[in-house]
Image (cartoon, grey):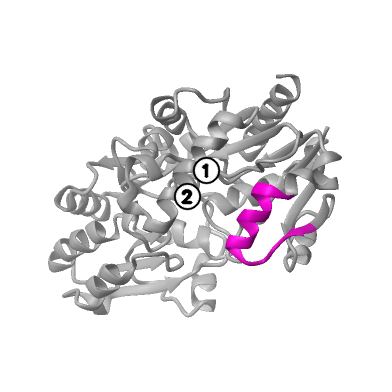
Amino acid sequence: MKVALDVSAVPPHIAGAGRYIAELARRLPDAGVSTTLVTRRGDTERWRDRSPRAEVRGLMPNERVARLAYEAWLVGASVTARDSDIWHAPHYTMPRRGSTPTVVTIHDLTFFTNPEWHERSKVAFFRRAITYSAEHARVLVSVSDFSARLIDAMIPAHAPIVVAPLGVELAIFQPEDRDDESILRSHALPADVPFIFFVGTVEPRKGLDVLLDAFGEIARDDHEVELWLAGQAGWGEGPIEAQIEGHPFHARIRRLGFVVDALLPVLYRHARAVTYPSRGEGFGLPVLEAMACGASVVTTDGTVMAEVAGDGARLVPVGNADALAASLADVLHSSDDDRRQWARRARGRAEHFTWEACVAQHLVAYEKAMVS
């Protein structure tokens, strides 16, 4: 089987959906798939390093608008597409010309359900693009049952769906302390401060406004705990930045920015609590990664994160700062026995999600697309 995987939407700092695409790029050749990675023209070396067994072709323009136009009207007729059994478009959009069977990953339907979470310029574009992909792809990949149900509800006349939940590298994201204190100090971070940890893009849907309100309640009673925020700046971060600057406990909020892969599991393990109060996602990878590390996780009920978490995390209502504060306070003051029980439960739940299983579901999708 020859698969062309479009990795051109993945930014330099890999997280979220980018992590999913990077794991596919690395693992498909090991699964016996002849893999061609289609990159931006200036981004070939990175992908050769990440997936040395794949062929890399820098076909896509570097600038975003030009890249999307090239994908829509030109790349589907390229030699790379014609020589492939499957074209996999892993980020909503797909070529509109060409005859190669196409598989498209639709991560979430928030452009339809909650347009206020996105830049206005993107909403109209991605609504049209997702609808087109859902109706014209041979097969759709959904990263969760939650998102698959939304596709059914929002775009009834869609292609067959294969659900492929994301995975976690269990050997890396694991509960065992690996000299965590030294690693923290090597990144100029204190190892003796209790902290609540959040990682995610700074944008409206992540619930950082709710977390900051909750931290205000917690910090009034707990004079030591800090809030550590990791992640890249997104769109609409202005109000969040203002809330942080004006926060009554601003001095106890630590901004980490983008966190390198080697540090992230340490932060999950060493945190007194990990929270991901997002209003909505396609999957919610930080919840899974934190649970794999045995962290005490608090996330939002009624979302895909609840589907991922199962019984491995505490759940609070979306947007409820009081409930979030109460649950985090419960975690902060829990006994060592309680923490060990939650850690075992979290790790056990996380072990249901592997990248190997995710890749296997993609092979199902590719086979289905070839015969449909």
Q: What residue sits right under mark 2 in the picture?
A: 125
Residue 64: in magenta span: yes
Answer few, some or many: residues within 10 Å of disc 1's Cα (few below 14, many 20 plus, some between 14 and 19): some
Pick out the residue farthest to the top.
372
Would residue 183 be found to the left or right of residue 303 on screen? right
For residue 100, say whether it is visible. Answer: yes
Question: For the residue labelled by badge 1, is the local secondary structure a helix, a strand or a loop?
Answer: helix
Kind of element beneath mark 2? helix
* Residue in view at x 34 percent, y 55 percent: 206
- Over which residues does the magenta segment extend? 58-74
- Amino acid residing under circle 1: Ala
Based on the picture, tell me whether residue 321 belongs to the magenta stretch.
Answer: no
In space, the residues marked 1 and 2 are separated at their CA atoms by 6 Å
Q: Position of residue 13 (x, y in %)?
A: 58, 65
Q: Amino acid at mark 2?
A: Phe
Q: From where the camera sits, is residue 285 visible?
A: no
Tell me residue 288's x, y (percent): 47, 44
User: Residue 193: x, y in percent?
Assistant: 34, 71
Image quadrant containing the C terminus: top right
Q: Nearer the viewer, residue 247 or 239?
A: 239
Q: Are marks 1 and 2 in contact (CB under 8 Å)?
A: yes
Left or right: where does residue 39 sit relative to residue 296?
right
Q: Quadrant of the N terminus?
A: top right
Where residue 303 sits, quadrant-wise, is top left
**Front-lying residue, 103 or 268:** 103
* Disc on res. 159: none
Mark carried by residue 129 = 1
Kindly indicate the quadrant of the structure image that contains residue 329: bottom left
Report the side of 353 relative to 255 (left or right): right
**Residue 320 vertical position relative to residue 223 in the rendered view, above or below:** above
